[in-house]
């Protein structure tokens, strides 16, 4: 550490010991992790895409970032195996609002293409791909690089109950602040390193790393329940229950739907019968696993 920084570091340490102050440090990707101690490890991928917009059928990827890591059976991260970062030039100009958010300009992506062979080689050994909004990132990733259709996926935004573990929200930057750091947001590989730190964080509720909680949830089956032809005036009741709207443009039903743990399926049907349809009702449903959850194929 440069000598000029020593007083600042000492002041930060002193402030951190006081209950009256909270200190955030710039995130520097860590190099020290839990020792494997001869235990078998598995490999995961953290992934983030930056795009020209939110339409997963028509907008385009302009940047792909990934971090490959090993983890232990108890969910502790054992080490980083590499990173991947590449720009992709879209067919049209990058919208000004996207440049304002990400800092990515037309000049930065000009002439760049993301090599599918390089992506496949980087991802091949991974047993799970994790994104902080997997329902967004997975659809883009599968559209560009078919290897992602073969992988199990996890979502760090929805498959950890952050409020239960003392956080007030699930936004990436907020969670990183909760671990004591800040970073340059909305650049793909930087967001992946931020997510790595968040998943390595030991949750204050039980001392287990956040990754362990995510993996346990990702391994469970969920059931998607469709509330087709539900009364329009009860849409707010469904929304409060966690239902989302599908407009039917992607081949799925035009209907409200919700994903529930398989142990809560009977309870959800009882809710629909008693509160929505007021009669016997057998909804359309679909069992989902980490291999199809968050995919457009679901």
Image (tube, rainbow, N blue to C red):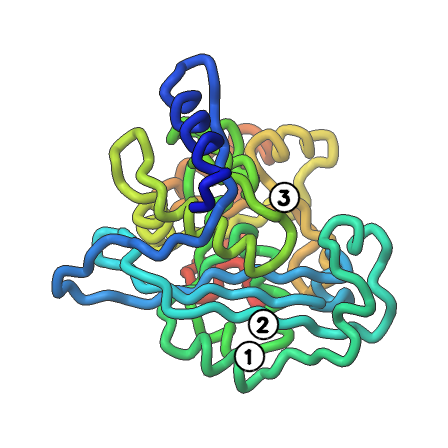
Q: Is disc 1 surrounded by few (<14), some (14 to 19) or many (20+) residues within 10 Å? A: few
**Picture coordinates of residue 74 (x, y %)?**
22, 52
Residue that lies at the very extreme toward the left in this rendered image? 38
- Secondary structure at numbered mark 3: strand
Mark 1 to mark 2 CA distance (whole Å): 5 Å
Decide: is 128 above or below 183: below
Between label 3 and label 2, give the one nearer the viewer. 2
Q: Badge 2, how many Cα within 10 Å: few under 14, some, many 20+?
A: some
Mark yes or no: residue 212 visible.
yes
The spot of residue 243 in percent (x, y) is 59, 40
Q: CA distance from mark 1 to mark 3?
A: 27 Å
- The answer, for residue 162, to whether it is visible in the render is no
Left or right, residue 119 beside residue 152:
right
As helix, strand or loop, the secondary structure at mark 1 comes to helix
Query: Disc 3, disc 2: CB below 8 Å?
Result: no
- The answer to whether mark 1 and mark 2 are in CB contact below 8 A is yes
Q: Quadrant of the C terminus?
A: bottom right
How many marks the image carries: the answer is 3
Q: Earlier in the sequence, mark 1 or mark 3?
A: 1
Question: Circle 3 is placed at which residue position?
Answer: 244
* Residue 238 left/right relative to 290: right
Residue positioned 63% across, 56% down in the render:
187
Q: Which residue is mark 1?
A: 146
Question: In this rendering, would 289 be left or right of 295?
Answer: left
Nearer to us in this view, 16 or 111: 16
18 relative to 10, above or below? above
Q: Which residue is mark 2?
A: 142
Residue with the most extreme bottom position: 117
């Amino acid at each position: 550490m440069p000598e000029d920084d020593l007083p600042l570091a000492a002041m930060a340490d002193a402030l951190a010991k006081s209950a009256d102050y909270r200190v955030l440090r710039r995130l520097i990707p860590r190099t020290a992790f839990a020792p494997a101690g001869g235990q078998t490890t598995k490999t995961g991928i953290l992934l983030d895409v930056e795009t020209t917009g939110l339409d997963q059928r028509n907008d385009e990827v302009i940047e792909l970032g990934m971090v490959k890591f090993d983890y232990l059976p108890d969910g502790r991260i054992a080490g980083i195996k590499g990173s991947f970062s590449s720009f992709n030039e879209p067919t049209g100009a990058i919208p000004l609002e996207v440049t304002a958010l990400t800092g990515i300009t037309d000049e930065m992506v000009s002439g760049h293409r993301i090599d599918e062979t390089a992506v496949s080689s980087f991802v091949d050994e991974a047993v799970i791909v994790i994104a902080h909004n997997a329902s967004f990132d997975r659809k883009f990733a599968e559209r560009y690089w078919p290897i992602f259709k073969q992988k199990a996926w996890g979502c760090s935004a929805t498959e950890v109950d952050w409020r239960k573990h003392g956080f007030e929200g699930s936004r990436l930057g907020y969670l990183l602040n909760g671990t004591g750091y800040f970073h340059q947001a909305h650049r793909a590989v930087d967001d992946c390193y931020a997510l790595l730190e968040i998943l390595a964080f030991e949750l204050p509720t039980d001392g287990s790393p956040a990754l362990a909680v995510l993996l346990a949830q990702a391994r469970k089956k969920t059931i998607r329940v469709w509330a087709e032809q539900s009364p329009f005036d009860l849409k707010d009741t469904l929304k409060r229950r966690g239902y989302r709207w599908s407009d039917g443009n992607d081949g799925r039903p035009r209907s409200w739907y919700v994903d529930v743990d398989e142990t809560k399926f009977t309870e959800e049907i009882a809710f629909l019968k008693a509160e929505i349809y007021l009669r016997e009702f057998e909804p359309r449903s679909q069992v989902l696993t980490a291999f199809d959850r968050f995919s457009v194929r679901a």
